[in-house]
Image (cartoon, rainbow, N blue to C red):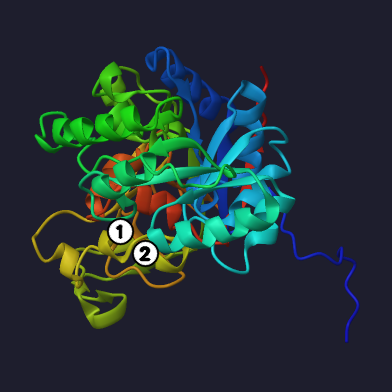
Amino acid sequence: MTDFPFPETAMVDFDAAPLRLTVDLNALVENWRSIRRISGKARTGAVVKADAYGLGVEDCGEALFSAGARDFFVMTAEEGASLRAVAPDARIFVLAGIWPGLEHLFFEHDLVPVISSWQQLTHWMGVLSEVGPYPCVVQVDTGFNRLGLSVEEALELADDNALPQAFSPVMVMSHLMCGDEATSPENPRQLAAFRKVAEAFEGVEASLAATGGIALGSAYHFDLVRPGIALFGGTGGASLGFTPKVTATAEARILQVRDAKAGEAVSYGASHRLTRDSRIAVACVGYGDGYPRGLSSTGVPERLDGSGPGEAWFEGKFIPVLGRITMDMTMFDVTDLPEGAIRAGDYIELFGENRPLASLATSAGTIEYDMLAGLGLRYQRSYIPFAD
């Protein structure tokens, strides 16, 4: 084997990476502080599940903790264990709850399980009989039909005088199914149901509102609000009365710029036929990196309605996708750029300050949550550190 004078590491320098993701932790913190001001008397937590919506739970969690966040929500105990390393005295709530075989993670990392069914509750009571008092959260389903005890079950639990003293919930919570639809009649219905539960668990904190619910007003705030997408630059912040700062910028390297003639086809299925002589920039990004196939210009169900293709940004201009997006590569039409303006090795902006994530998600027929959470493992991440 030939010896090469390169360092023995799998890490790639950010400036040379095929895919780059820049995360501005100052913007993240500013978004959190804006929500904290809006939340009034309620404390402001942070939902950092799915690796902080794809942006990195440890880096994002550490910045939010440094800024004063003390209540975090993750989905799994493994996520909670990762977060604990950077949020030493925060309360970390695990939305998936506790199951046999996971107990050691909760106790080793001081995680709080969210109990959402009688099955989990029965298991939890057995655990408490061995370890003694330990905090938990009781989740109540007020109409979502996703997770939680029914309202009737929760009221029965609150009124059960036979419960062991070791059972000591620190919070009851529920989730709005139409929180981002201000006029939905489901919101006041769920609020009324949750109020009954919150009143029954006297002396226990209550939490109902995620990002959308915060905008519905103080009646929905209770003791703790749980912002998620608005922290990471999602448009949910607009309904709260502030413009969220852009937290993440994704870029892809151009691998090749090639010429093609009118009448030739581009990408799988020959679904896009060129109507003019064209220049095509091939970028190192595809649906394997969370760049949705629905952004293709032709040949996929999402585009059969005649809507336009996805676009990236390069030096002041939008460049449209050509043909079907593939697993690892996407072709862009750069014919309208000056000749030589874009070359192999250049980077295009997939989303960020110039190409808003929300409009890109709309073009793909999806939502911002899906775009961020779907970011693949191939992005080399760079963090702009939080500086208070």
Q: Nearer the viewer, residue 86 or 202?
A: 202
Contact (CB < 8 A) between labels 1 and 2?
yes
Q: Position of residue 84 (x, y in %)?
A: 69, 43
Q: Which mark is residue 331?
A: 2
Secondary structure of the residue carrying numbered label 1: strand
- 10 Å neighbourhood of mark 1: few (<14), some, or many (≥20)? many
- Would you identify the image quadrant in which residue 219 lies? top left
Q: Residue at x 71, y 48 (%)?
A: 109
Name the image quarter holding the C terminus: top right
Secondary structure of the residue carrying numbered label 2: strand
Name the image quarter holding the N terminus: bottom right
Q: Residue at x 20, y 40 (%)?
A: 178
**Would you say 344 lies left or right of 172 here?**
right
Relative to 56, residue 12 above or below: below
Q: Which mark is residue 321?
A: 1
Q: Nearer the viewer, residue 349 or 264?
A: 349
- Would you identify the image quadrant in which residue 42 lies? top left
- Residue 209 visible here: no
Q: Position of residue 332 (x, y in %)?
A: 35, 59
Residue type (three-letter) at the residue carrying disc 1 = Val
Q: Residue at x 65, y 40 (%)?
A: 59
Q: Nearer the viewer, residue 331 or 55?
A: 55
Residue type (three-letter) at the residue carrying disc 2 = Met
